[in-house]
Amino acid sequence: MEQTLHIIQLYESIDRGIRQHEMTRHQMKLADLTEGSQWLIDECEGQESYDEPNKIIRLKWVLTVDRLTDDQFDFTFCDRTYTLNRHWQVLGTEIYCIPNPYMVELVRYVMYFGADEGDKSEYPRLKELGDLMMENESHPWKNIPMAREAMRLLKDRRKCRTATQAKAFCKKVLSHDLVSPTSTPRLYLSYLDYYHRLLGSAYYKGELTDRLLNAIDPEYSDEEFLDDLRDSHQKLYDPVQRTPQWEEVIYDVERECEARMQGVKRHHGYCHKRWGVKKEILAEYGIQWRSPAIMNPRIRFD
């Protein structure tokens, strides 16, 4: 079944405390997504101020295809460059404000590759994956391949008749942190973005969401990222965990670390031994990593 690029426009207006939501869907065929092609996704009008009621601003939301491979889609949208993994990722753009002095108007776009429809037999598998992932609640790295499989199933059910089950699954993943927001921020945000695509509204930009959106933004410096953690009184972690390279290999790294730590007793100081082994394995992948103990010298771990 051929994939298509789905673009979901989430519109939210707030007028005198009343919120209204609208959701518009766009689809683009793979054959049309040629390198360098430009696509007008949407356009709207805004008004700058009360003082100039006749001055209307026309906003255009244009997508430019930079590169498309079997695995990855690189594109420019509203002067920002994005990378979308075709297999499991769901990518939400910034929330853009439409100039209007009379009400708050916000628009955001959620993008992903998926089939138009799928087999209903996928949903028993989704429940099975949810049960298995709950067993790993204290070790979310073990859920990475299952979380990606589940997201593929969700994305391929655009005409899903059981949206309630899909919402419940996404909510379970997010509320129980069945994927780690610090080790796999893109995977976590994929569930957050898809969940709010199901709800049909832009999500509330809370502190964690802001921090994760900044974490995956290549234009956001490591210093700014660490300052954010300090300001929110969070434990620091190595900014290398922000990178796509980290997220691609971390499951294999953790699995190898688990194998090498077989037989090591879980007594005082175990976490430091595990971090040492993890550091060695990451180095084999060409990734230099600083453990939580190094990043937080004033905190005593285990």
Image: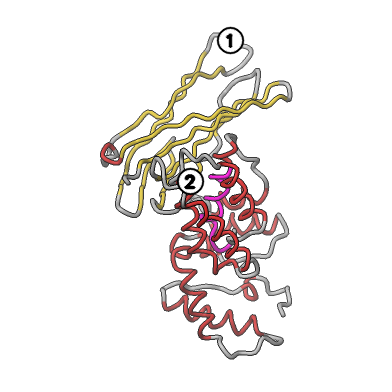
Q: Is residue 64 left or right of residue 256?
A: left
**135 up-or-down from 270: above or below:** above
On the image, numbered disc 1 is attached to which residue? 53
Q: Name which residue lies at 56% across and 56% down.
A: 127
Which amino acid lies under the numbered mark 1 shown in the image of this protein? Pro
| Residue 301 vs residue 153, the one in the foreground | 153
Please state, as top left, top right, bottom left or bottom right, where the C terminus lies in the image: bottom right
Where is residue 52 shown, x and y percent of the image? 58, 11
Q: Report crowding for label 1: few under 14, some 14 to 19, many 20 or more residues within 10 A (C-alpha).
A: few
Q: Earlier in the sequence, mark 2 or mark 1?
A: 1
Q: How is the image coloured?
A: secondary structure
Where is residue 196 shown, x and y percent of the image? 58, 41
Which amino acid lies under the numbered mark 2 shown in the image of this protein? Leu
Q: Is residue 33 left or right of residue 178?
A: left
**125 up-or-down from 290: above or below:** above
Determine which quarter of the picture holds residue 51. Answer: top right
| Residue 207 vs residue 145, the one in the foreground | 145
Residue lying furthest top: 54
Q: Nearer the viewer, mark 2 or mark 1?
A: 2
**140 up-or-down from 3: above or below:** below
Q: Name which residue lies at 30% across and 53% down.
A: 70
- CB under 8 Å between discs 2 and 1: no
Identify the mark at residue 144; answer none if there is no mark.
none
Whether residue 187 appears in magenta in the rendering, the answer is yes
Where is residue 224 shown, x and y percent of the image? 59, 54
Q: Report crowding for label 2: few under 14, some 14 to 19, many 20 or more residues within 10 A (C-alpha).
A: many
Q: Tag 2, which secondary structure?
A: strand
Q: Name which residue lies at 64% across and 57% down.
A: 227
Where is residue 248 shown, x and y percent of the image? 44, 64
Bounds of the magenta span?
182-195
On the image, numbered disc 2 is attached to which residue? 91
- What secondary structure characterizes most of the magenta part? helix
